[in-house]
């Protein structure tokens, strides 16, 4: 099987396995991205078969898909506490289960939803599991006002920022902010780096998700592995 279709098959397998954790009556956090796409499609099928859930979305694209699938969406404030959030990830560190998220640009809402959830499950293909975080650049959401100053601070810290673009323009998040992707390489202490970045005035959120995932559902070829904290 070519690499891309193997990867997609793994994404689908992990994403659908995560749906088995959903019970009637739950409030579900819906992450964003090409893996969670399969989760939302599967939930849609179950909803049409009678499953009753409410869901909280983490992005415009997830909202559109969930609506098309007939999944009832409520706001995060209506939800209060979310029973279970299913999301994807760009990298997951094997031992700590810390991760990098935000490749799709939804890191801010994803982190807020995750922190409002009793349980967080990430569904990932086997390429996402790493010994050490950092090969995937760390996305950082930055408010546009004064963002050049923030960019220079990242440069001084040798974190190698790159402005995320969409076509000819800067990429804009659902909240109208920019993303700087930090190509810093191997991260020796993700928790400290997260704290250091968050202290910079103008930074809204980082894509470093520390101590957030409770379980990882990882698909390798046609098998599913569960990694727990
Ligand atoms: C979006 C995310 C996604 O979960 C992450 O980028 C993984 O995406 P995909 O499932 O498409 O590989 O954090 O902000």
Image (cartoon, helix red, strand yellow):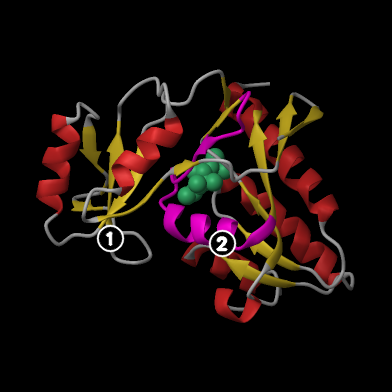
> Of residues 194 and 152, which is closer to you in this image?
194
**Where does the N terminus fall, quadrant-wise?**
top right
Spatial distance from mark 2 to mark 1, Cα to Cα? 18 Å
Left/right of residue 102 with respect to residue 54 in the rendered view? left
Label 2 residue SS: helix
Q: Percent x, y for residue 55?
A: 67, 70
- What residue would you read off at disc 2? 113
Q: Percent x, y for residue 220?
A: 73, 24
**Where does the C terminus fall, quadrant-wise?**
top right
- What residue would you read off at disc 1? 177
Which residue: 80% across, 27% down? 222
Q: Percent x, y for residue 3?
A: 60, 22
Which residue: 49% across, 63% down? 59
- The relative height of residue 62 versus residue 18 in the rendered view (above or below) is below
Q: Percent x, y for residue 33?
A: 54, 49
Q: Nearer the viewer, mark 2 or mark 1?
A: 2
User: Magenta segment range?
Assistant: 94-118
Label 1 residue SS: loop
List the single residue furthest toward the bottom. Answer: 78
């Amino acid at each position: 099987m070519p690499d891309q279709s193997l990867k997609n098959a793994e994404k689908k397998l992990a994403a659908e396995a995560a749906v088995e954790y959903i019970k009637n009556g739950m409030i579900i956090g819906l992450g964003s991205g090409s893996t969670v796409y399969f989760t939302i499609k599967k939930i849609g099928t179950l909803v049409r078969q009678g499953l009753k859930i409410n869901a909280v979305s983490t992005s415009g694209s997830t909202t559109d898909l969930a609506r098309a699938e007939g999944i009832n969406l409520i706001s995060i404030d209506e939800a209060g506490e979310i029973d279970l959030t299913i999301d994807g990830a760009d990298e997951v560190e094997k031992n700590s289960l810390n991760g990098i998220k935000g490749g799709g640009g939804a890191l801010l809402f994803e982190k807020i939803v995750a922190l409002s959830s009793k349980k967080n499950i990430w569904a990932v293909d086997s390429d996402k599991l790493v010994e050490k975080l950092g090969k995937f650049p760390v996305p950082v959401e930055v408010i546009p006002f004064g963002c050049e100053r923030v960019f220079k601070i990242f440069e001084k810290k040798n974190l190698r920022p790159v402005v995320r673009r969409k076509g000819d323009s800067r990429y804009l998040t659902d909240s109208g902010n920019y993303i700087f992707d930090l190509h810093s390489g191997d991260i020796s202490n993700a928790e400290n780096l997260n704290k250091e970045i968050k202290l910079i005035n103008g930074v809204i959120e980082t894509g470093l998700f520390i101590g957030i995932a409770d379980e990882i559902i990882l698909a390798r070829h046609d098998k599913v592995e569960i990694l727990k904290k």
